[in-house]
Image (spheres, rainbow, N blue to C red):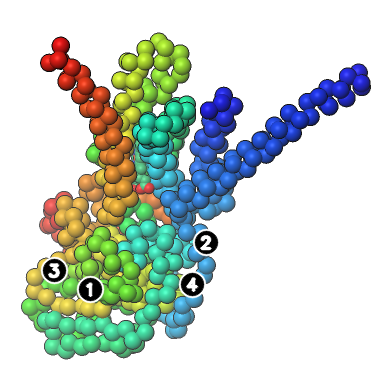
Amino acid sequence: MKNENKILSREITPEAMYFNRRNFIRAGILAASAVATGVVYRKLNPVGTETKKTIETAKIENVVKPTVIATNDTSGFRVDEKQTPFDDITHYNNFYEFSTDKEAVAEKAANFKTDGWTVSVEGLCNKPKIFALDDILKIAPPEERVYRMRCVEGWSLVVPWIGFSLSKLLNAIEPLSSAKYVAFETLLDATRMPGQNTDVLNWPYVEGLRMDEAMHPLTLLTSGLYGRALPPQDGAPIRLIIPWKYGFKGIKSIVKIKLVEQQPRTTWSDYAPNEYGFYANVNPHVDHPRWSQATEQRIGEGRRPTLMFNGYEEQVGHLYAGMDLRKNF
Amino acid sequence: MKEGDIKFAKLLVLVNGLVPLALLVWDQSHNRLGANPQNFLILTTGMMALIFLILTLAVTPLRKIFGLNWLIQLRRMLGLYAFFYACLHFLCFYSLDRAFNFSSTIQEIIARKYIWFGMTALLVMVPLAVTSTNGMIKRLGGKRWRALHRLAYVAAICGVIHYYMQVKADVRLPLVFAAVLAILLGYRILEYLRSRKPKAAAVPAK
Ligand code: HEM
């Protein structure tokens, strides 16, 4: 037995070596190809997890917290739902000025500088003014508002924003009675906002509200979240939050606010008038032409039914009394 | 190419086709699918289905242009991977987007034009997968089998339209897919026209 084995093994040695070497090379090719495929896969399907680090923005002092009398508080200033983790709010952003990839915005926006920021508040008013950012922030004390945020794409967050009602700024410039709408504009600077080098959208991003919508106490001129200044990817240094409307109405990095007589153009309804309306109120009964709006993916949780006016019907329903919300979507 | 080399090439395709799935499962178990893992799973599986479909369709042009006849031996596996990821894509939609609700799935399929195209692509791939075995090729006969499997182009065209339609605004990547598909299809059409010409010329010469 032993003897036989020896002879056999001696005989096959050269061939075995040949096979071994070839197998070795093949194993190498196999491994290398799998790595290459993995790299291509990651390129095509980036999740941006590498950038998941805490963003250092300044702390906001003396924030006024909303009263927590959940049962009889009808302000809508605080929803009692689980707040979305900071990391998710800051790494899942629709901000085409930096990237059309929601997971990539944080990284692309990381070095966005807002030094010397000004906001021109103008149009049909008695006291138009170009505000330095600090001066705007002094108009009213910062309040925390815990709002639902519903994206038109079918996902949602709960965010503790910091800001104050836009009405306080508008009152300060004394609107004329001829002012029927408010038009907003984002910074236009392709060197700081590289996404503006593409023509995916018409730059600068513009938005608008009817005067009564703009004056509603829920409409928040927002400068922070989670007790800190807005990170660049969430619209630094100052943005709008209108919690009963789809997220795209909440224009970011605002440089101009203008009181006007006619309904202003807005970026998304310019882009696709049949898909995105001027009002863009959250409405589970009116689908986007390409997808259902009946339910939403709450980030970090499961799917849930979407609420009329995003759950703020009690506060804002009267603004749209008698309007056909299918036509005025 | 030798038998052993072809076996190895098949192994390469087999392993590499599983890489995206392995990474998906790995990332999922490490909570690394980003803020919206449900949507990520739907998008990624759809993307993989389309990529494997395009790779499948690239086999014949590459084989003819570069004379790499052995490539044909890899085509079935590429096609089956396309079908596999398309099924996963649908399952993700059914489970994560529609919460296993059959009637809301049907409603959504009926209501959304972009899903009509996705559905068509998936349905078209079913007979192709079923008839992908050697036995089926024999039973159908090469000619009929080839005619049937031209439906792979229908699946890919529907897949690209489906992709293009569901994008919100940035259509650059879907257009790249459309361009690649147009090149592959254009090549086949040119080939077909070229193969017909001599015959047409031969008629008057008789
Ligand atoms: C019944 C069948 C199908 C259904 C219900 C379906 C559904 C969907 C849904 C819901 C999305 C994501 C929309 C969004 O959240 O933005 C999507 C995206 C996509 N689907 Fe399908 N799909 C189907 C079949 C297919 C097939 C067969 C293919 C490939 C050939 C495909 C390729 C894609 C691609 C490439 C995307 C976009 C991925 C991305 O944006 O990265 N789908 N599909």
Quick check: is the Cβ at mark 2 less than 8 Å away from ligand 1?
no
Image quarter in which the C terminus of chain A is found: bottom left
x, y percent for residue B123? 33, 27
Q: Earlier in the sequence, mark 4 or mark 3?
A: 4
> Would you call the spot at circle 1 few (<14 residues within 10 Å), some (14-19), or many (20 or more)?
many
- Which chain letter goes with mark 3? A
The part of the image, by quadrant, that contains residue A161 is bottom left
**Label 1 vs label 2, nearer the camera:** 2
Q: Earlier in the sequence, mark 2 or mark 3?
A: 2
Alpha-carbon span between mark 2 and mark 3: 40 Å
Are discs 1 and 3 both within one chain?
Answer: yes
Task: State the residue at coordinates (45%, 84%).
Answer: A61
**Label 2 vs label 4, nearer the camera:** 2
x, y percent for residue B98? 38, 40
Residue indicated by mark 4: A55
The answer, for residue A59, to whether it is visible in the render is yes
**Label 2 vs label 3, nearer the camera:** 2
Residue farthest right in this picture: A2
Q: Earlier in the sequence, mark 2 or mark 4?
A: 2
Q: Which type of secondary structure does the marked residue at label 2 adopt?
A: helix
Q: Amino acid at mark 3?
A: Pro
